[in-house]
Amino acid sequence: MPTRRQLLLSTAAMSVAGIGALSGCSDTTPVELEEGDSLRMRVWSESAATAYGDSLTAFTDSTGIEVELEVLGWEDYWAQLPLDVASGDLPDVLWMNTANLAQAHASGLLLEIAEIVGDDVESWESAATDLYRLDQGLWGVPQVWEQSILVAHEGLVDAVEGDASALTFDAAAPSDPLRELCHALTVDGEGRRPGETDFDPAARTTFGFSAHPDRTAVLGPFIAAQGGSWQDEDGTITFASAEGIAAVQYLADLASAHLGPAGKDTVADPSLCRTLFLQGKLGLLQTGTYDLHTLAEEIDGTFSWGIHPVVAGPEGARPLVHSIAALGIDPHDDDRATAIGELLRWLGGVEGQRPLAENRLGIPAHQDLRGAWEKSWDAAGVDVSVIEVPEAVAQPEIGNRSAIATGTAMPIIAEVFLGETDAAEALPRAQQAAREAVG
């Protein structure tokens, strides 16, 4: 079993200035746990644990409920979870993603939170909240959400008189605005572009678009924009539709036409496109808001870059949205359940989430924190105002064993980018393998 790193956030003698009674928390009848007892909350991010620190101390000051915050790394987190389910040693509150929600829900151990949080849910972004609705219940308090975005090297784009603000693709057409801009951006050491005599793809100094098999940033949004889906509403894998095949083949063809890094290179190094962008060699990187910290820190003013909506297809722009939520574990004890409810309400409130927003740890789930989040990024020199709550999205993995299914499918889909087969042959095979992985 992995070793837990525990940060004890106990009652402080000093009050927190400016924070009165917690919204949604009782200020008349204190919640009582056994002497020396505390609630346990688990996350997989050291940065989030640090950010939560003052917030949870304020929660303790107001309620008298101590919170012991456990931090496990990503791999250890998911390895430990089934062990704790089996042993009955789950924390009271834990972070969850959508890919693992169905399995956690199937355990029968989760608290349904609609009655616990009441009207507070109306203050949360529905794009984040709705991902935790299952079997007519709400099973998580969204903390942050992320979405896929397009970032552009504005210097490279401006030099070819391009515009990355509303790019589109059309898999059925001989060309489209995305391919045209990629062609202009792609140059070898002698200044030649793809299709020109003696163009040398091995000597490219700049590349067009990050056409690589990235499920979240690229495949999901392109398949959805083409009119397909990764899964249907029941969770059945459906990416091998005609629309899915067209979208994947389009992306692989971009790479093989030298308008993006070679497929053999991006399959071998999934972070290559981001690396090239950081080096100032890639004009267009479709990624996610989760990469903003890395981009801001490593570019550090060496060139101008901007954020834009993802490339749109026949069905428009379809960014993939996912969120992280705090789930409550049913303790089968009224006093403890009341204490867990207090913590969940706090985590759903402005003061509970403010440290995450001000530290730029994902887009805040609470609508009232949008301004604080934008202000924090503005102080870091990044304009995130273009990132809007999307009306239509590409869905993340849902359902039992969905993450395993995607992991099974991706190496087969990668064969298309390697040039070993085409999407019409690979995607049905990948879909069948993914469905078998679900069982």
Image (tube, rainbow, N blue to C red):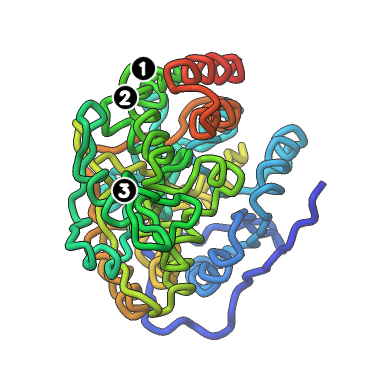
Q: At label 1, which amino acid type do we have?
A: Ser
Left or right relative to 65: residue 344:
left
- Residue 111 appearing in the image: yes
At 42% across and 41% down in the image, what residue appears?
Answer: 255
At 25% across and 57% down in the image, what residue appears?
Answer: 308
Q: CA distance from mark 1 to mark 2?
A: 7 Å
At 61% across and 65% down in the image, what residue appears?
Answer: 46
Where disc 3 sits, the SS reads loop
Query: In the figure, 207 relative to 351: above or below?
Result: above
Which quadrant would the C terminus be assigned to in this image? Answer: top right
User: Could you say where residue 120 lies in the image, as x and y percent from the top left?
Assistant: 31, 51
Q: Nearer the viewer, residue 4 or 27?
A: 4
At 40% across and 78% down in the image, what residue appears?
Answer: 302
Q: Nearer the viewer, mark 3 or mark 1?
A: 3
Where disc 1 sits, the SS reads loop
Sequence-wise first label, 2 or 3: 3
Q: Nearer the viewer, residue 238 or 103?
A: 238
> What mark, if any, has residue 241 been given in the picture?
1
Sequence-wise first label, 3 or 1: 3
Cβ atoms at labels 1 and 2 below 8 Å apart: yes
Q: Which residue is mark 3?
A: 196
User: Could you say where residue 332 lies in the image, as x and y percent from the top left?
Assistant: 61, 37
Q: Nearer the viewer, residue 402 or 261?
A: 261
Q: Nearer the viewer, mark 2 or mark 3?
A: 3
Q: CA distance from mark 2 to mark 3?
A: 35 Å
Q: Residues within 10 Å of mark 3 (few under 14, many from 20)?
A: few
Left or right relative to 219: residue 319:
left
Q: At label 3, which amino acid type do we have?
A: Glu
Sequence-wise first label, 1 or 2: 2
> What mark, if any, has residue 228 been given in the picture?
2
